[in-house]
Image (spheres, rainbow, N blue to C red):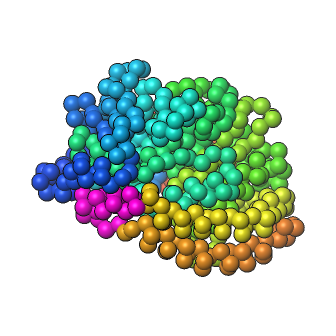
Amino acid sequence: MYKMNLKHKTINKAGIITILVSLTVLPIASQTTVSLDEVKLAGLHVIEISTNNNEEPQGTIIESEWQPGTYNITYKNKVPCRIVISLLNDILFDSGPYEKKSSGATIRINGNTSAFYSDPLNMPYKIKLEKANDLLCRGNNDKYSDKHWRLLKDATSLNTIVGLKLSQLIGLEWTAAYIPCNVIINGDYRGCYLLMETVKQNNLCRINCDKKVGYIVERDPYWWKEEKYFSSQWYCDESMYRWTWSHPDEEDLNETIEQYVQQYIIKTEQSINDGNYNEYIDISSWTKWLLAHDILGTRDSGGANMYFKKYDNTDNSRMEMPCIWDFDSSYDVEPGNFSRLHTSTHAYFNSLMNSNNREFAKSYFNLWNQKKYELVNSLKEFINNYSHSDEAIALNKSRKLNNKRWNTSYGIVENDAQLTLQWLDNHIEPLNNNIQLINVEYSGIKPNVLNTNCNDKQYYNIGGIKFGSSVNSTVIIQRSNNEHIVRKIINK
């Protein structure tokens, strides 16, 4: 559908290798068009986006300096637009034309590897309204209004729909609401999406934390795309992760906020290592989060989004895990195995499970044994009912349009449902057997040791190649405050 013309590489102040590209879109005649009438007759909500001057949201391909050969996309422009939402020709929402702080919205490319592997006209997107409203049209704008929304390309499978249902059943604080929809941009059908709420502070309908002194942060493998990020003892040096901000926004951060959150996370990590984590983490929410991923069989321990919330900046609140997000690798472990998030040393759970403090292990063990049949049976009932729902019928029609437009071969919802149910049937009993083997008393296993060798110094040779603490080069270059400074010359 398109070709990339590589121009040249530059290294910006954050150390990101940026590959400037031109995304050459082939003429529309080479693509299969889908008429507006076909889209509206499918039966899903229709999102019509009209951008100013028909401008397209664009992105820039970047390569991580920290993981060479790993490519990604960051957005290049925020495009002013008007958004109209309809269902069977009934208009449910109209943002009006774009006027800053008054009406309309902006749209930009969003996502990481999902965006990199997408056609330039079929990207995941982020929408920001100029005036808060409820794009899901639930009839109570005062309760559900927000400025921030996402269009994810997740309606072509049931992974996200099932994952979010499990989030509700297991009782996490917040589960993102969504509707499947068909998206039209500037009169051109772009495909089948989920219109979703985003991870934001909103005490009425999203994540509940103090607006002024509450915090939401993410353990983020794509931190190198952001202007603001920070390290902790666990995630520093050669780690692929840092911490980035969901609340407050980057422009609202100051040194006091950054230092408080960073120090609290460092203390939390140390408490996990020392076994006195009860004072720092909300064991219940962490347990629910992990168990949900174990039920879903999540393979990805690297990219899976891990959000943490602290309600305020007092000792009265602990680090909570309020929501799950990112279900791309569900059902992708051997049936009966724990998710890789459970066993990987990239996350905290392996250390918590092996700690001499057995409270986390007990909480996980008891939650499963108390709710396993309720959780699994309710999830299976939802999957079966959904596959026969009116929404699934409309989704099947919409997937056919998506396949026609992009020459893909996504199947019908009923087939997805049967595969998911079959996987759960094969997974749950052996998973239960593994969970019963968890020793809720101290087993004498030595917990993982924290990486405590983190500092702000990162060493490079004269050619810009990064070293850890071992240097075999004539010149050491220390990166400090986003600059390269020659600190020491070593004679061979």
Residue drawn at x 51%, y 57% as measured from the top left = 161
Q: Main secondary structure of the magenta part?
A: helix
Residue 483 in percent (x, y) is at: 46, 35
Q: Nearer the viewer, residue 223 or 416?
A: 416
**Image-based side of 108 in relation to 7, left or right:** right
Q: Quadrant of residue 432?
A: bottom right
Residue 324 in percent (x, y) is at: 59, 52
Residue 438 in percent (x, y) is at: 78, 71
Q: Please determine whether, in this image, residue 482 is positioned above or below residue 304.
A: above
Can see residue 78? no
Q: Quadrant of residue 349?
A: bottom right
Can see residue 25? yes
- Number of disc labels: 0
Residue drawn at x 45%, y 25% as measured from the top left = 131
**Image-based side of 453 in relation to 366, left or right:** left
**Image-based side of 320 in relation to 237, left or right:** right
Give the extent of the magenta segment.
393-410
Magenta-span inclusion, residue 461: no
Residue 36 in percent (x, y) is at: 24, 47
Q: Please determine whether, in this image, residue 446 is positioned above or below residue 475.
A: below
Magenta-span inclusion, residue 402: yes
Q: Quadrant of the N terminus?
A: bottom left
Q: Nearer the viewer, residue 137 or 376?
A: 137
Residue drawn at x 39%, y 58% as measured from the top left = 395
Residue drawn at x 87%, y 67% as measured from the top left = 441
